[in-house]
Structure formats: C-alpha cells, structure tokens
C-alpha cells in the first residue's frame, strides 16, 4: 500500500509518500509560507529537489498542490490518486486519551481539539491538515499518530508534578512527553541492531535535534522522558530553555514588565543554545563560533552536553541499569564530537566509545568499543516510516 504521511505545522507542511511493502520513500517535500505566499520543495525518489512558488493561501490549497505533484506527468510518482491507500497524520498532543495511533473519526477530531489547550499551535495545525485531506480525498482512511502516545506507559511517579493534586485531577496537568514516534522507532531499531528482544532491554534514547529529549525505555515501554506538559521541559534545546526554576518566570516578568505568556515565549523561542550563545540555534554555527574563540558559544554547548549527561544518569538510576544508549536526530546522528563528549562522562556505567566506530554520520552503527558494558549506538530516526507503519497496521 502507498501511504501519504502528512506533518502539518501552522505555516508549513511536510509530506512523504511511502510504499509500505518496500518501505521506500517514493517522494517527499515541504510546503512553506502557507497563508503568506507559498513555497514548495518537491523531491521524487532518485531525482533532485524541484522548487516552485505556487500561491498557498491555505492548507487545503497546499495539499491540493502536493497531490498534483504526486500525480504530475513528469515529476509524479503515481498514475492517479487511487493508488494511495491511506493517509497518516502526525498529531502532537494526544493527552491521556490516546495511548496509541488510531483511525480518525469525528470523535477523534473532537478529542484532539480538546487536547489543544496544551498544544495551542500544533494541534489546530494538525487538524487543519486532517480536514483538508478529508475534503480532497473523502474516501481514504486516515490515521492519527501522536507524539505523546508512546509515553502513556509512564508510571504515575514519573508523570506527576509536585504541585497540588487538583491541577492534575481537574486540568490534566502532568508530564506527557513528546518525540514519542522517534523514541519508539529508535528503541525498536536498537533492539534489532543488538539482536535482542526489546522486552529484555533497558535503553536510553537521546533525541538531540533542534527540539531535544531523552527517554528511558524499559522492556519496550517508555518509563520516563524529559519533556513535560509541553516540549519546553528537560534538555537545553536549540531555542528552548529546558528545566529551570519556575520563579525565574516571575522575576523576568517583573523586571521587564511582561506577562507570563510573553516570558514563556522567551523560554520557547529565544533561549536554549541560541539564547546562551547569542549566535544561532544551529549547532554547526555555534561550533564554528566556539572555534573562533567565542566563549559564550563554548559555554552553551558545554551546558547542553552536561544536561544530556545528567538525564542519562537519572534514567540509568530510574531503570536500575542501562544496556544501550542510542543517539538520534540532527545532532545525535551527525555530530560525532558531541556524542564523544557526552560519552566521556559515562565511564561510571562502563560505557566506552570507540573513536573510529564513532566516525559515522547519518547511518546506523554501533559506536562503542567491544569491551563496553553499555552498547552505544547511532541510529537515524524515521518518524515518517513509523507513521506509515502504524497507518497500514490500522487500515488493513
Ligand atoms: P528538528 O527536527 O527538531 O528541527 P533536527 O533533528 O533536524 O531538528 O536537527 C537539527 C539540528 O541538528 C540543527 O541544530 C543542526 O545544527 C544540527 N545538525 C545537523 N547536522 C549537524 C552536524 N553535522 N553537526 C552538528 N550539528 C548538526
């Protein structure tokens, strides 16, 4: 079956058409500046990127343009839309209602809307994508895959915040976690690479991209993860602060005469390694600045690494051991120096990185030495493939 995977943001939309039998990507692309003017990058498998600037006043128009590209005589990859068997949608927040992926019904849409309080930018965008696809392909089954679902196995002790219980009971304020599709995919791949049953493994997955999170996966289930009610908690990220003393919000609000929302916006968009370095949110730019002697850039990277190291320690403790630590996403897959620095703190676990094996970028590899007590792995994530797999499993 050919599955269209849609990842819809407020002004952008990523797509992939995946053949579920071969798991090959037939075409992929990105619509940007939706609602502003419109920019499309379309890439059929084995060909270069094709860029154009069709008007995209709304998401429905953008998806219509994507469907035209997929069936285009010259650059298309299917003869007609009838060849597409289902659509899988990435939805960010599934609250406590969604513990796994599901077929999209009116009821599901209503429940996703209810979860929008915790993801006010992401969930509505996801639903706009769902509705646009429903209008353009009314007979096709659609599946929702949630970033939070994999973490619904966390025990209460891991997801409760130490605040009055009523905020959880009445408002659902708790830790939910994100990047679940990636953590599930990567932990599954880690077990395959080690030739072991995931049920017998304790794995720590470090998803280190612009957004970053660490998850403790025990027996194939998420038992703790670093992001919380929203993706702001946990690691120091590209532009997000991660963990901090909540009193800082009051301090900045008072000092700069800002509302709580304005301060949280600073914590989401102007903080992290970007805010600390004052250079960029892109790790490559920050490294270049560090190499040119920028001390703040070096300190930002050190703080990022140190926070990852602390979470690894916390999760090794939470699981009473760890068999494998997997690195994924932009930094985790490509930045061997950052992987090596993180692992340099892990001697107490008996983890030893092999510098030659660690010289990998964007490919799956074991990067630990043969005598390492913990397997260290580099594993490219593939959230789209995971969405396609879930979609096929549900519509078949
Ligand atoms: P997201 O999906 O959250 O936008 P990605 O997983 O694509 O993020 O990761 C993007 C980050 O990965 C960027 O900050 C980029 O600098 C970083 N990155 C990509 N390649 C490298 C590399 N070779 N060295 C260091 N950082 C890298």
Image (cartoon, rainbow, N blue to C red):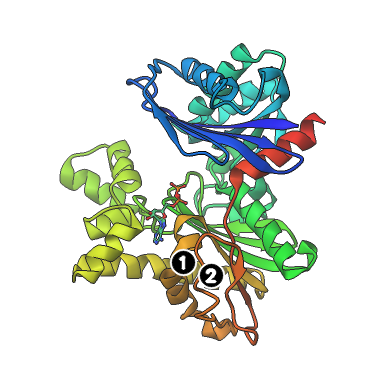
Observer-nearest of 110 and 327: 327
Mark 2 is surrounded, within 10 Å at the Cα level, by few (under 14), some (14 to 19) or many (20 or more) other residues, namely many
Q: Is residue 294 left or right of residue 110?
A: left
Residue 229 visible somewhere in the drawing: yes
Observer-nearest of 366 and 206: 366
**What SS does tag 2 mark?**
helix
Q: Is residue 240 above or below residue 70?
A: below
User: Residue 103 is drawn in which quadrant?
Assistant: top right
* Residue 112 position within the rendered picture, expressed as x and y whole percent measured from the top left: 60, 28
Q: Is residue 336 left or right of residue 316?
A: left
Residue 95 visible somewhere in the drawing: no
Total numbered labels: 2
Which residue, given by chain and number where applicable, does mark 1 sit on?
308
**What SS does tag 1 mark?**
helix
* Residue 358 position within the rendered picture, expressed as x and y whole percent measured from the top left: 52, 74
User: Residue 236 is drawn in which quadrant?
Assistant: bottom left
Residue located at (78% from left, 68% from top): 196
């Amino acid at each position: 079956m050919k599955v269209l995977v849609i990842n819809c943001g407020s002004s952008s939309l990523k797509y992939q058409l995946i053949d579920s039998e071969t798991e090959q990507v037939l075409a992929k692309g990105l619509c940007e500046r939706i609602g502003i003017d419109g920019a499309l990058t379309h890439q059929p498998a084995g060909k270069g990127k094709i860029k154009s600037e069709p008007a995209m006043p709304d998401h429905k128009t953008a998806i219509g343009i994507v469907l035209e590209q997929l069936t285009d005589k010259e650059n298309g990859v299917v003869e007609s839309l009838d060849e597409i068997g289902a659509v899988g949608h990435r939805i960010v927040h599934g609250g406590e209602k969604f513990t796994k992926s599901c077929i999209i019904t009116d009821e599901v849409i209503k429940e996703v809307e209810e979860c929008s309080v915790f993801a006010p930018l992401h969930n509505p965008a996801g639903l706009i994508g769902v509705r646009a696809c429903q209008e353009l392909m009314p007979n096709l089954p659609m599946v929702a895959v949630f970033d939070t679902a994999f973490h619904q196995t966390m025990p209460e002790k891991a997801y409760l915040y130490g605040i009055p219980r009523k905020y959880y009971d009445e408002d659902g304020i708790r830790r939910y976690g994100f990047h679940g599709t990636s953590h599930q995919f990567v932990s599954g791949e880690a077990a395959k690479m080690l030739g072991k049953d995931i049920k017998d493994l304790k794995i720590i997955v470090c998803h280190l991209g612009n957004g970053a999170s660490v998850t403790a996966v025990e027996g194939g289930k998420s038992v703790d993860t670093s992001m919380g009610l929203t993706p702001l908690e946990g690691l120091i990220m590209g532009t997000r602060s991660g963990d901090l003393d909540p009193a800082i919000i009051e301090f900045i609000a008072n000092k700069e005469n800002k509302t709580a929302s304005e301060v949280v916006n600073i914590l989401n968009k102007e903080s992290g390694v970007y805010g600390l370095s004052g250079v960029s949110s892109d790790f490559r730019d920050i490294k270049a600045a560090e190499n040119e002697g920028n001390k703040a850039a070096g300190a930002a990277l050190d703080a990022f690494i140190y926070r990852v190291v602390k979470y690894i320690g916390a999760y090794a403790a939470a699981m009473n051991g760890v068999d494998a630590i997997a690195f994924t996403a932009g930094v985790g897959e490509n930045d061997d120096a950052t992987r090596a620095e993180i692992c340099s703190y892990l001697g107490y676990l008996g983890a030893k990185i092999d510098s030659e094996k660690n010289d990998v970028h964007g490919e799956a590899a074991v990067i630990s030495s043969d005598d390492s007590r913990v397997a260290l792995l580099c594993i490219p994530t593939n959230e789209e493939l995971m969405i396609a797999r879930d979609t096929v499993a549900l519509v078949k």
